[in-house]
Image (cartoon, rainbow, N blue to C red):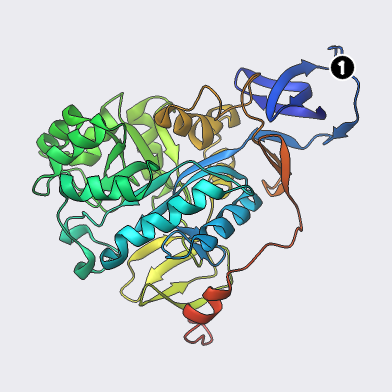
Amino acid sequence: MQIIKSHAIYTESGIVDGYLVLKDKQIDRILDKRGELPEGSIIDYGYHRILPGIIDLHTHGYRSFAARTLHFEECLGFARVMPSIGVTSFLPTVCGWKEHQIEMIEAVSNAIAVQKQGARMLGIHMEGPYFHPSRHNATPLTELKEPSIKEFEDCLNASKGYLRYVTLAPELPHAQKVIKWLDEHHIIAGGGHTTADYEQFSDAKANGMRVSIHTGNAMNQMDRREIGLLGGALADPDMYCEINCDLVHLSKEMLEIMFRIKQNYERFIMISDSDTVSGIEPGYYLVGNQRTRVTKDGRMLLDDGTIAGSCRNILYGIRNLAEEFHIPLTDILKMSSLNAARLLKIDDHKGSILEGKDADLVIVDEAYDVLETYVEGQSVYQANDELPSNPRFCEEVPIIFEKEGAI
C-alpha cells in the first residue's frame, strides 16, 4: 500500500487537497485532509499537481524510438520513454511502409504481448496508408493504396487482436464497407487524410466512423456550401475530434472556433502526432527516406514545408490550453485523458483519478514539466532519470547536415 499527498489532486469530480491511497495497482481511496489514513509511509508532493496519466492515441514515436519498425524491442523502448512526458497509456501508431505492413504490425503486437515496463501500449493505431492522394502529407504517394476487407482481416490476424484504431479516407473505393467491417469487429474507424464531403462523412458515420483524425489537418477546409468532414465532425455532438494543441498544426483562433462549435470539451481528444525525432535536438534527419527538419521552435517539416508531425507533446498542449486559452485544467484533463479512455471504452479503469481505477498518475511542476509518473501504481519515471536511446536510430537516421540559420 502506498500513500501520496498533494494540495492539488485533480480527481474526476474535482480538486482535492489530501491523499491518494494506492493498492494493487489501483486507486484504493481518495481522502481529504480530514480523512483517516491507513498506516504507511507518505510521499508528499506539496503544492505540485497530481494529474491523471495522459492517454495518447496518435503517436508514431519519441526520442529515437518508433512504431514504424520490424524490431519489437524498439516498441518496448518507445513505451519506456513515454512516461517522461506524462504519458501512461498510448496507441503506437504505424503508418506507410506497405511492403512490410504485416511484419510491422507483428512487431508491435509482439511488444504489446510481452511488455512489462513503461507506459501501457493499449493496442495498435494503423494510420493509413489508405489516404486520398491529395492529402498524403508526409506519406509518399508510392505508399498509398485502397482499403479492402481482406487486407484488414490479414492485419487483424497479424495483430493478434491488438488492432484497435484505424485512419482512412472515407471517400476511397470500398472505404464505406471497410468502415462498417471495422465497427462490427470493435475497431475504431477514424476519418483522416481525406477530401470527404459532408455526404461522405454522413455515410461514414452511419457505417460506424467515430472520430476525426488530427481535425483540421490533412482534410478539406470548410466552404460556405460544402462543410466536408471537418465541418461535419465539429457540428456533430457525438463525433470525437482529435486535436493537436501545439499551436503549429492549428492556430489559436482555429482552436477557439472549434471549441465554440462543439460547445463543450467532451468530444475533443488531444494528440501529439509525435515521431522518431520528437524530443531530440534540432537539425536535419533522414526519416523514412525523407529529409526532415526539426526546428528550434518545435516544428517538424519536410523540404517543401509540409508538416511531418510534431516535436511537442500533449503536456505542452495542456500548458497552451491553460495559459493561452485559460480553459480550466479540469476540462483540459478530459481532453488529455478521459475522453480517449471513453472512446476506447476503457474509462471504467483508466482516464481519470477515481477510486477503483488504475493508479496512472503524473506529477507536474508549475511549468508542466514532469516530476514523476506512475503507471498502475508503480513509479516508472522521475525527473532527470536517464532515458534509453535506440541504437538503430544512430545507424539508420543520421543527421544529414546542419548549417547556421537553417533550423
Query: Residue visible at 18% across and 33% down?
Result: 180
Q: Which residue is mark 1?
A: 37
Instruction: Characterize the local packing of mark 1: few (<14), some (14-19) or many (20 or more) Cα atoms within 10 angstroms.
Output: some
298 displayed left or right of 32 = left
24 displayed left or right of 212 = right
Where residue 222 sits, quadrant-wise, is: top left
Q: Nearer the viewer, residue 258 or 77?
A: 77
**Which percent across, then down, holds residue 205?**
20, 30
**Which percent across, then down, holds residue 93?**
41, 52
Disc 1 marks a residue whose amino acid type is Leu
The answer to whether one can see residue 245 in this image is yes
Q: Quadrant of the N terminus?
A: top right
Is 181 located above or below residue 311 in the figure? above
The answer to whether one can see residue 273 in this image is no
**Which percent across, then down, holds residue 262?**
35, 28
Q: Nearer the viewer, residue 387 or 273?
A: 387
Query: Residue visible at 73% across and 62% down?
Result: 386
Please state the total of marks drawn on the protein image.
1
Tell me the SS state at disc 1: loop
**Which percent across, then down, holds residue 152?**
23, 47
Is 59 located above or below residue 13 in the figure? below
Query: Residue visible at 51% across and 58% down?
Result: 75
